[in-house]
Image (cartoon, grey):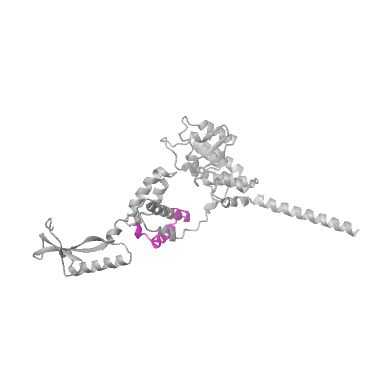
Amino acid sequence: MARQGATRKATREKGVYELVSETRIYNRKPDICYYIAFKIDGKLTWEKIGWISEGYSIKLAANIRAERMRSLRHGEDLPQQKKKVPMFKEVMEKYLAWADTSKTNGRTTDSYLYKHLTRFDEKRLDEIHPFALEGLKQDILNKGLSPATAKHILVLVGEVFNKAIIWGLYQGDNPIKKVKMPVLQNKRERFLSHDEAHTLLSALKERSQQLHDICILSLYCGLRMGEIFNLRGQDLDFVNDLIHISDPKNKHPRKAYMTETVKEMLFARKPDSPGNFLFKNRKGDKIISISRSFERVVDELGFNRGIADPRQKVVAHSLRHTFASWLAIQGTPIYTIASLMGHKSIAMSERYSHLSPDHKKEAVLNLEKEINESKGTHIRMREGFNE
């Protein structure tokens, strides 16, 4: 090491300085360390280049300084400035900690998705470009994961960058803006008949009363699973038969209406304290996902036997989808369905207006009936005129 208090001396190269060590020896001579000096926004900045014993020379130091000057002229960040940009892993850890207290399902879902992003752990945020994210998307799809999963992973990347920008950790652009999201073809088409719903609920009740009750809320009230898991005693209004949904997916609180069956079930489940959750796991904590027993019961009933298209399979979300489908079949206005479902726009509910083939067939047959009746009236009028 150089002696404490030793001074750097100018060399023949502009802006290049040397410091002679009194303790380090190289090739039987005192080792020398080179430094460069330049100004950033009028402030003198020093940068250590390295020792002769490490392969550095006056000429190399001068070349590095020239490169720094070129970067400054073109408004580019210098290496020492780039070090201030955080690593992806560092920001992700901060994001997951934030998700624990700020997101409905905490860090559970995000932690699962993060497993697909560890390739970026040792990269700074400014080193993650759209091309790399396109490659990530393709790798995910090549593994056989669904386009929906790929989209969720990419959305998480975008959220992490957005938070880094908001928190003042990063000043660059969000690369996700230039990535084309996978096209999803995952709109549910299958909904349960009344008989199927009754059969499913009966089987669920034999397996788990709590699972049965959760599914009752989704099927009879159209609640999302996350909304059901968030329900507390204070959200139940038995006087007006209302369920207050305070933390929905779209951030807009709404009301759900209790049927007699739902009211009876909720009254039996009403917790002692208004702040307690209605549904809990075996440890007494809030539930964060539907029990695997639901899938097992569906398999036992054979609802998905021989079905490959995921849009035609019965899953937990099918209950909410069935709720909206039944409303549409009985002629409920789309605006009302959108309101009950908590959709952001009517466009999200429009698909329910034509889910029932029988309903469409009835409309066409009624149209033909009116045409024939009109045609018969026209013929009788013409025959009467000819007479």
Residue 324 lies, in percent from the top left, at: 58, 46
84 left or right of 222?
Answer: left
Query: Is residue 30 depicted above or below 198 in this figure?
Result: below
How many circles with numbers are drawn on the protein? Answer: 0
Corner quadrant of residue 126: bottom left
Q: Where is the N terminus found, in terms of image quarters?
A: bottom left
Residue 8 lies, in percent from the top left, at: 15, 62
Taking the spot 86% from the left edge, 58% from the top edge, the residue there is 382
Camera sees residue 194: yes
Corner quadrant of residue 201: top right
Q: Which residues are magenta?
A: 125-152
15 left or right of 183?
Answer: left
Taking the spot 64% from the left edge, 51% from the top edge, the residue there is 357
Is residue 145 shown in magenta?
A: yes
Is residue 291 shown in magenta?
A: no
Residue at far right of view: 387
Residue 189 lies, in percent from the top left, at: 57, 51
Residue at far left of view: 28
Query: Is residue 281 depicted above or below 188 in this figure?
Result: above
Residue at far front of view: 42
Taking the spot 50% from the left edge, 42% from the top edge, the residue there is 227
Query: Is residue 215 depicted above or below 371 in this figure?
Result: above
Q: Where is the C terminus found, in terms of image quarters?
A: bottom right
Camera sees residue 212: no
Residue 169 lies, in percent from the top left, at: 34, 53
The secondary structure that most of the magenta stretch takes on is: helix
Query: Is residue 76 depicted above or below 303 in this figure?
Result: below
